Image (tube, rainbow, N blue to C red):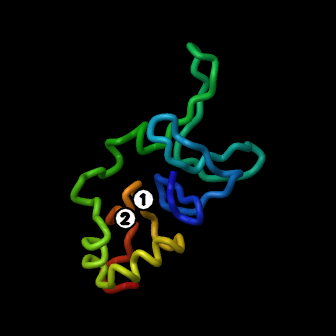
């Protein structure tokens, strides 16, 4: 799960609420899933019944359709690379990530990881 103060969709990067989130059985990341048919909502994945286990299975679009998403390691940046890319200090970027302003992952050893697509465009903070 994400380490930010607000839960962020792992597919689109937008905020989730308890009523709009589900967790992928494959990657364990949160994603948008409209759980009610009477209210419009966003779906960034699917849910279905596994007939073998007679249980619900949840899958995010990144895992169900990986060909649609660029998952290149070139797009994964650590704190120093990300700060250099957008032109701010590492301290400012780490503080913004801790406040939940930028989608990120933080490893158990404290390393910040960012996807290039979730960072502000260079020169546009």
Q: Position of residue 39 (x, y in %)?
A: 75, 51
Name above or below for residue 73 compared with residue 49. below
Q: Position of residue 43 (x, y in %)?
A: 58, 48
Q: In this figure, which residue is indicated by the disc labeled 1?
A: 105
Q: Tell me the crowding category of disc 1: few under 14, some 14 to 19, or many 20 or more residues within 10 angstroms, Cα based.
A: some
Depth order, front residue of 81/50: 81
Depth order, front residue of 13/98: 98
Query: Of helix, strand and loop, which one carries label 2?
Result: strand
User: The C terminus lies in which quarter of the figure?
Assistant: bottom left
Depth order, front residue of 10/40: 10
Query: Of helix, strand and loop, which one carries label 1?
Result: strand
Q: In this figure, which residue is indicated by the disc labeled 2?
A: 112
Residue found at x 29% / y 59%? 76
Mark 2 in CB contact with mark 1 (< 8 angstroms)? yes
Name above or below for residue 8 compared with residue 51. below
Residue furthest front as drawn: 109
Residue found at x 39% / y 39%? 65
């Amino acid at each position: 799960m994400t380490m930010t103060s607000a839960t962020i969709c792992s597919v689109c990067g937008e905020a989730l609420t308890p009523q709009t989130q589900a967790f992928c059985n494959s990657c364990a990341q949160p994603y948008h899933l409209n759980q009610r048919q009477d209210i419009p909502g966003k779906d960034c994945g699917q849910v279905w019944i596994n007939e073998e286990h007679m249980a619900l299975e949840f899958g995010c679009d990144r895992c169900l359709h990986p060909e649609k998403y660029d998952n290149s390691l070139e797009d994964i940046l650590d704190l120093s690379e990300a700060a250099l890319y957008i032109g701010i200090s590492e301290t400012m970027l780490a503080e913004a990530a801790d406040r939940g302003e930028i989608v990120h992952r933080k490893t158990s050893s404290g390393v910040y990881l960012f996807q290039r697509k979730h960072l502000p465009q260079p020169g546009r903070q």
